[in-house]
Every structure is written in structure tokens, then in C-alpha cells.
Amino acid sequence: MNVEHEVSLLVEEIRRLGTENADGKISVKFGVLFNDDKCANLFEALVGTMRAAKRKKIITFQGELLLQGVHDDVDVILL
């Protein structure tokens, strides 16, 4: 799959799993995204897709790299 397509799929999954935060933006915890069965089957490299989306300013999250377990409570925010 190409990166553009994977990023668009990531946006769809964040909308599906996330909720609107106080700023009116859609937000989902990394752990929810990472542990979702559909996401696990959809993305070969979820973290890589997230980094590409962050570079394109489509999403934002604290830090440079998110790891399962350690960063499960980090918000992934759709811009």
C-alpha cells in the first residue's frame, strides 16, 4: 500500500474510534488504536503510518515515537 492511502485509512479509524475533545477535535488514545482488531489487521506498521501522518500535519501526538504499553494513554489528535 502507498503511504497516502494508509494515512487516509488511519484518519478513518481515528474518526471511528475517537471522541470529540474540548477543542472540538477528534482524539483517541494510542492504546485504543493499537489494540483495535480492525487496525491490527489494516496496518502493517501503525506507528510508521502515524509518523507519516504527523509529518504531513494530519495528526498530532506528544513525542516522536509511540510504543505499546508505555504510551497507551497518549492522545492521538486529528487536526
Image (cartoon, rainbow, N blue to C red):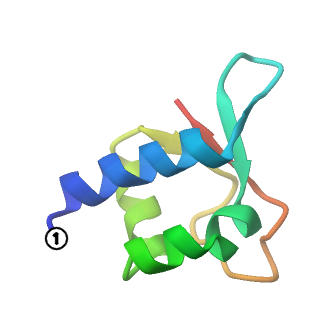
State the residue in front, 78 or 39: 39
Farthest left residue?
2
User: x and y percent of residue 52 in the render?
Assistant: 35, 58
Q: Which residue is mark 1?
A: 1
Which corner quadrant of the image does residue 30 belong to?
bottom right
As drawn, 2 above or below 8: below
Q: Residue at x 14, y 64 (%)?
A: 2
Residue 58 seen anywhere in this rendered image of the structure: yes
Instruction: Name the element at disc 1.
Output: loop
Give neighbour class at mark 1: few <14, some 14-19, many 20+ (Cα, 10 Å): few
For the point 50% across and 42% down, the residue is 59
Depth check, front residue: 50 or 38: 38
Q: Is residue 32 above or below residue 78?
A: below
Q: Give how far across and how far down residue 1 sits, in percent.
A: 16, 70
x 83%, y 20%: residue: 22
Residue 33 falls in which quadrant of the image? bottom right
Residue 55 is situated, as x and y percent measured from the top left of the image, at 37, 50
Choose top left, top right, bottom left or bottom right for residue 68.
bottom right
Please indicate whether residue 47 sits to the left or right of residue 9 in the image. right
How far across and down, in percent of the image, does residue 49 sit? 38, 65
